[in-house]
Amino acid sequence: MSFVLIHGAGYGASCWNELLPLLDGESLAVDLPGRGTRADVDLRSVTLQTCAEAVVADVLAADLRDVVLVGHSFAGVTVPRVVAAIPDRIRHVVLLSAVVPPDGSRVLDQIDPDVRTLVEQSLAGGIYHQSRDGARAMLCNDMDEATAGSTLDRLVDDAAALLSERVDLRGYDLDVPRTYIRLTADQCYTPDLQERSALLTKAAVEWMDTGHMAMISAPAALASLLNRIHG
């Protein structure tokens, strides 16, 4: 069994650095197109489908099976495409404060109105650029100064299309066990929106008392929960 970790918007695989050493068994953190090991890809060309294809390519290249697929935040709309593409390799899906709007709608339709305004102001020329101050308010509310600094240092631009493209959730209709981890102190994807997403995916629910970037602010607690699901 192995973990495959998919990051959310504004980050690459490095957001999982604190968590990876604490996970049982093999683990793979994927860089979606346009960041990290795939930084050569023009962000303006990135779509939900090319994100899913990147995850599938990494899983197949490593020949991983019995995968616990972990999707954080905006990865909630990449995960079902991955499951639909390689259902025989996915053992369990874990959604960490994952954004899951209704099928056929957009990520922008599912986020808190106050957050949506900030996000829409950050979209230009096909790029989603978060300011450091805005990201600090949304992502670092449960962190000390050093941890917040480390988190913000990893912030990168993202593809605007991932927020405005219509989502395809058919992979959530497949018979793959799902767990949704709700984060009670999340100021980015608020608890009420997490509840909607958990209900939409018909997932079992676990809880953590953290902000949005639980893999950085509480890696040991998150690892313990994931290892329990893995086991």
Image (cartoon, rainbow, N blue to C red):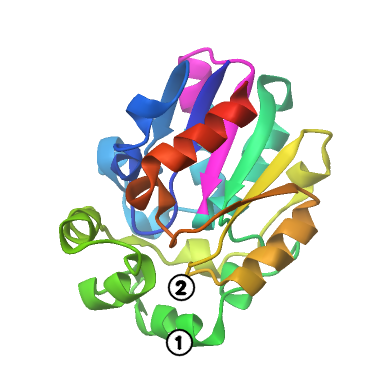
- Which numbered tag is attached to residue 158? none
Residue drawn at x 46%, y 15% is 62
Q: Which residue is mark 1?
A: 117
- Three-letter amino acid code at the position of disc 2: Gln
Mark 1, Cα crowd under 10 Å, few <14 / some 14-19 / many 20+, is few
Question: Upstream in the sequence, badge 1 or badge 2?
Answer: 1
Residue 214 percent across, percent down from the top left: 42, 51
Residue 195 percent across, percent down from the top left: 70, 65
Q: Nearer the viewer, mark 1 or mark 2?
A: 2
Residue 17 percent across, percent down from the top left: 29, 37
Question: Which residue occupies the foreground of this view, 44 or 71?
Answer: 71
Question: Which residue occupies the foreground of this view, 21 or 53?
Answer: 21
Q: Is residue 36 visible?
A: yes
Q: How far is mark 1 from mark 2, CA to CA?
A: 14 Å
Q: Which residue is mark 2?
A: 187
Secondary structure, mark 2, is loop
Residue 158: within the magenta?
A: no
Direction from residue 228 to residue 177 in the image, left or right: right
151 w.r.t. 19: above or below: below
219 w.r.t. 198: above or below: above
15 w.r.t. 211: above or below: above
Snapshot quadrant of residue 156: bottom left
- Three-letter amino acid code at the position of disc 1: Thr
Question: Which residue occupies the foreground of this view, 207 or 117?
Answer: 207
Q: Which residues are magenta?
A: 57-72
Residue 143 percent across, percent down from the top left: 29, 61
